[in-house]
Amino acid sequence: MKSGKVWILISLSALAACRTPQMSSEVQAAKLAADKARSEAIEVKAPIAAEAEFNSAQAFYDKASEDFNAGSEADVIANYGEAASGFLEAVEIALESRMEAEDAIIEADRAIERSERIVEDAISSVTGGQ
């Protein structure tokens, strides 16, 4: 009886292997590029700073996964490529936004310092330098 159960398990494993599409090296490379770009985008907070671009790239990424299950390799590669490009665009936008924010903070700090000097000068002139 044990050999019957083993045979069923082997048969089910073989059937599952036949139904699971295998990735070609081109698809693997395209997916790897998209995965790396997506990870970088998430790391720099692109889903927040470049929401539209990130979501568009994510839609291509999701479509590539759907196409993979349908077996359309050319579409999979194209969609992973679009996803990678979109994620990298989102990274660039997020980094530009970050730099602009950092510049704004530096300028605000300078303005605060100028204001503090003006206040100190005003107090000094009112009190007669005491």
Image (spheres, helix red, strand yellow):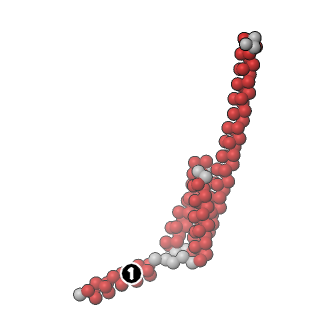
Query: Can you give x and y, in whole percent of width and height, for residue 78 in the image?
Result: 62, 69
Left or right: 119 with respect to 4?
A: right
Query: Can you give x and y, in whole percent of width and height, for residue 121 in the image?
Result: 75, 19
**Identity of the residue furthest to the front in this view:** 130
Q: Is residue 32 above or below residue 55?
A: below
Q: Is residue 57 above or below residue 129?
A: below
**Residue at 56%, 63% in the rendered image:** 61
The reply to whether residue 67 is visible in this rendering is yes
Q: Is residue 105 above or below residue 78?
A: above
Task: Read off the residue under disc 1.
Answer: 13
- Please state the total of marks drawn on the protein image: 1
Left or right: 16 with respect to 104?
A: left
Question: SS at mark 1?
Answer: helix
Residue 40: quadrant of the picture: bottom right
The reply to whether residue 79 is visible in this rendering is no
Q: Front-most of 89 and 42?
A: 42
Residue 77: quadrant of the picture: bottom right
**Residue at 59%, 68% in the rendered image:** 32
**Residue at 23%, 87% in the rendered image:** 1
Q: Front-most of 110 and 61?
A: 110
Left or right: 57 with respect to 1?
A: right
At label 1, counting other C-alpha atoms closer than 10 Å, the crowd grade (few under 14, some 14-19, many 20 or more) is few
Dot 1 amino acid type: Ser
**Residue at 55%, 74% in the rendered image:** 72
Query: Can you give x and y, in whole percent of width and height, for residue 100 in the image?
Result: 69, 43
